[in-house]
Amino acid sequence: MIILIGNGMLATSIKEVFEKELAKIKYPTYDKLWQFTRKDFDLSKVTLEELQHCITSKLAGGDPTGYCYPAGTILINCAAYTNVDSAELDRELSYEVNASGTYKLATFCKQHCIVMVQPSTDFIFDGRSPFMYSEYDKPNPVNYYGYTKLIAENMIQNSGCEYIIVRTGWLYNDERGIIPHFVKRLKNGEERLNGVTDQTISPTYTGDLAEQILCIVKNNLRGIFHATNSGDVHPDVLLKYLAEKLNIERKINDTTRFTFYTGRAKRPYVSLLSNSNLESLGLHIMPHWKDSVDAFIKRNFK
C-alpha cells in the first residue's frame, strides 16, 4: 500500500508513476495508492491523533477501529513549504509544515511500522564546496527553508521509523519550475533577461525523480540518497540553451548571484549533489539534464 501526502509537482508525478506500476505489476502489499491533500488535513495544524484518525478512517472505509496497516506499507511525504524567500519571513509556518508536520508523519509511521519516504533538498548545504555534495557531507544551510528541511531529516532519523530520504533540487514539470519559468520569459519577448553566471545547478524533471523513487522502493533500500538529473549548468547557459532549442533570439545579460538575489534569501553557490549511493549500487537511472530538457521541449513545443 502506498500513502501519498501532497498534490504538488512531485506528488503529481509520483502518483502517475506509481499508479502505472501498480496497474502493470500486482504487488501483494502495494495494491493501491491513497492520496491525502490539505483538503484532508493541514499538516501545519493537525495533531498526531487527528492525522492518524484521518488517514486510518479513509483507508478503513470510515471505521478505523482495529484497522491494521499491511506489511510493507510506504508513506511518501511530498507536503512542504517550498517558497524559499517567503520562508525567511513566515518562519513559523514553514517550520510547522516542513519540520513539525514531518515529525508527526514520522511518528505515525513508527507507530504502524510504515516505511517513510521523504524528499529533501540540496539547500541543506551551503554551496561553498568545490565538489559535488555526497550523502556523507556535513549540512550547513544558508537559508531558513534549508534549515527546516534539515531539521525534518533529523527528526525522521530520530523517530525510529524506517526511512528513505531522497535529496534533490531545482525541480520542474511541464507547467512549473525553473524550465517552464525560463521558457515563459523567453516566449514573452522580454528584452532584458538576466542569467546568473556564478551559480551551478542540475535541473531535475519530476517524472525522472518519481521513477528513481520507485526504483529505490522496489529495491527495498533504506537511508539517505541523492537523486538529481546528471550533469550541471549555470543558469545563464541554461537560458541560452533553451533559447537556441526554441529558435528564440534574446539577449541574455550576465549577472551575479549576489546581484540577482538581492533582498531575497541566500542561495548556495553550488547546488550539485553527487548521486554516489545510487551509482555505487548501479541504481541511478536518471538521465542527463539536457536529455530531459530536450524531451520537455519535444512534448510541449514540437
Image: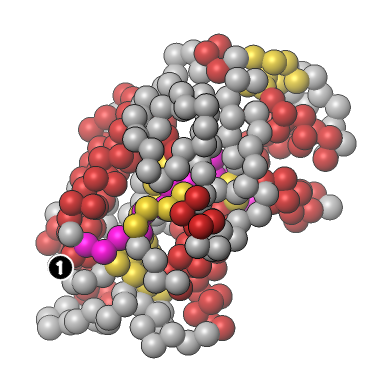
Q: Is residue 167 magenta?
A: yes
Q: Is residue 63 visible?
A: no
- Segment colored magenta: 161-176
Q: Nearer the viewer, residue 182 or 224?
A: 224
Furthest-front residue in this view: 280
Judging by the rendered image, the residue that carries numbered circle 1 is 111
For image coordinates 40% across by 80% down, the residue present is 30
Judged left or right of residue 195, residue 284 is left
Q: Is residue 220 visible?
A: yes
Q: Residues within 10 Å of mark 1 (few under 14, many from 20)?
A: few
The image shows residue 7 at horizontal and vertical percentages of 44, 56
Judged left or right of residue 163, residue 130 is right
Judged left or right of residue 82, residue 302 is right
**Is 120 drawn above or below residue 210 in the view shown?**
above
The image shows residue 143 at horizontal and vertical percentages of 36, 26
The image shows residue 245 at horizontal and vertical percentages of 83, 40
For image coordinates 30% across by 39% down, the residue present is 150
Which amino acid lies under the numbered mark 1 shown in the image of this protein? Gln
When asked about the image quadrant of residue 93, the answer is: top left
Q: How is the image coloured?
A: secondary structure
When asked about the image quadrant of residue 124, the answer is: top left
The image shows residue 146 at horizontal and vertical percentages of 36, 34
For image coordinates 76% across by 49% down, the residue present is 294
| SS of the residue under disc 1 | helix
